[in-house]
Image (cartoon, rainbow, N blue to C red):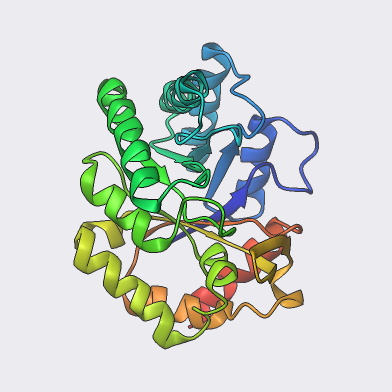
Amino acid sequence: MLFGTAGVPNSTNGTSTAEGIKRIRELSLDCMEVQFVRGVRMNEQTARNIRMISESLNVRLSVHAPYYINLNADSEMKVRQSMQRILDTARIGSLMGARDIIFHPGYYMKRPRDVAFRRIREAVEKISETAKHLEVILRPETSGRREQFGELDEIIELCRDVDSALPCIDISHIHARTGKFNTEEEFSEIMEKIERELGRDALKKMHIHISGIDYGVKGEKSHLNLRESDFNYRAFLMVVKEFSADGMLICESPNLEDDAVMLKKVYSEL
């Protein structure tokens, strides 16, 4: 399992992706999720340069698409714009050597859940077909708020229906959304479900988000540092190891690299 941060580490000298990758290596971390959350604002040459840097330092990259995505929007124009943002992310991500394209699929918009699922699936299928030549993995993410599409079962079913898709398991979102999934038994249930529904290969190619999290009746409120939250990260890491899961574990705590380094240390000691 590779450990890294969601975006450039806080202690980086500067804010560029290139400097962030160098800082990841200095911290003895393994990977970084490049954040395009406010738009894909990187040109092709920069993406190619980043690939050279990441490969030379053996830092693996993934990329998060903009937040302004709703594949179940009322406006068809907004749906098309959302699809294009994911495609733009996939194109630039592929140039920088990032195969994993993470995105939030959208909101229910007061539609029946089966209708929302069908509309989102159709959009993801079209994205998958258009991006086939890029050889990326589309990663719809489990969501933390109950008005958002993205329950664990929805994400797994979506990935089962679309060949080039695998889940981004935000384990803290699952905990915040349900108020559960905070014990070894419950974490094992998630791993067993992924393996049963998507195959052993899905556990060997995981992309996981983790952080402390504050939540209420509607789900996620904000991210916290792990030691300031009730999230049982040690039990989760234990289950990850027990299932021999591989892939990338991306820390989204406010202190980013501090928790990422701590998680890698705990994992190595289990």
Please indicate, yes or no, whether residue 167 appears anywhere in the rendered image. Answer: no
Q: Between residues 39 and 54, which one lies in front from this camera angle?
A: 39
Q: Which quarter of the image is occupied by the N terminus?
A: bottom left
Quadrant for residue 126, please give it.
top left
Q: Left of 181 or right of it: where is 38?
A: right
Between 185 and 215, the residue placed more toward the observer is: 215
Q: Residue shown at 47%/26% (left/top)?
A: 79
Vertical placement of residue 228 versus 52, above or below = below
Q: In which quadrant of the rendered view does residue 28 lie?
A: bottom right
In the picture, measured across the screen, residue 11 lies left or right of residue 60, that is right
Who is closer to the viewer here, 257 or 36? Answer: 36
Q: Residue at x 72, y 61 (%)?
A: 221
Instruction: Identify the residue shown where x is 42% and y is 27%.
Output: 90
In the picture provided, is 204 more to the left or to the right than 35? Answer: left
x, y percentage for residue 222? 73, 60
Query: At 63% across and 19% down in the image, what residue appears?
Result: 41
Instruction: Find residue 22 and report its horizontal and vertical position in percent.
Output: 64, 39
